[in-house]
Amino acid sequence: MAFINVEVTFRIFDSYSLKDKRRTVQSIIQRMKRRHSISLAEIGQQDMLNLGQIGIALVNESPVIANKILERVLNDIEEEYEIEIVEVNLV
């Protein structure tokens, strides 16, 4: 059984207000939850205009598959949104 819990910090390029930022972060969370059946939540940087931070948690029987899912999630986020992932920390 593999349990992965990471904190992802990213820079948002198209954010001109906290409302823009919030819309982007919530879109990432909802879309990735639906697509990959994982848990996500905004965990920090909530008052920073161009920085976001989310927590991602997933469980799978195989550590290899769990890591592949995490990698796919991070790739999807960077490809679909105007953001740059600056830090990924295992918790």
Image: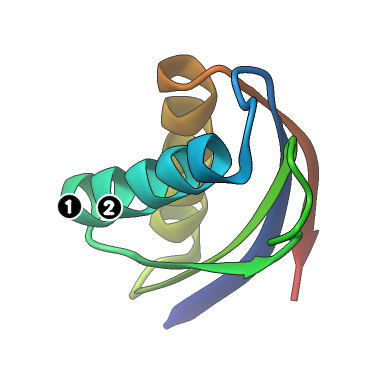
Callout 1: SS: helix
- Residue, x 52% and y 52% (percent of image)? 67
Callout 2: SS: helix
Question: Distance of mark 1 from mark 2, alpha carbons?
Answer: 6 Å
In the foreground, 58 or 62: 58
Question: Is 3 left or right of 47, judged from the image as shown?
Answer: left
Crowding around mark 2 (Cα neighbors within 10 Å: few <14, some 14 to 19, many 20+) is: few
Write down the residue under mark 1.
34
Q: Amino acid at mark 2?
A: Gln
In the foreground, 23 or 70: 23
- Residue, x 38% and y 53% (percent of image)? 29
Q: In the rendered image of this protein, does residue 64 appear above or below residue 6?
A: above
Q: Quadrant of the C terminus?
A: bottom right
- Residue, x 20% and y 45% (percent of image)? 35
Residue 47 locus on image (x, y percent)? 75, 59
Residue 22 locus on image (x, y percent)? 50, 48
Write down the residue under mark 2.
30
Q: Pointers 1 and 2 in contact (CB under 8 A)? A: yes
Q: Amino acid at mark 1?
A: Arg
Q: Quadrant of residue 50?
A: top right
In the foreground, 58 or 9: 9
Crowding around mark 1 (Cα neighbors within 10 Å: few <14, some 14 to 19, many 20+) is: few
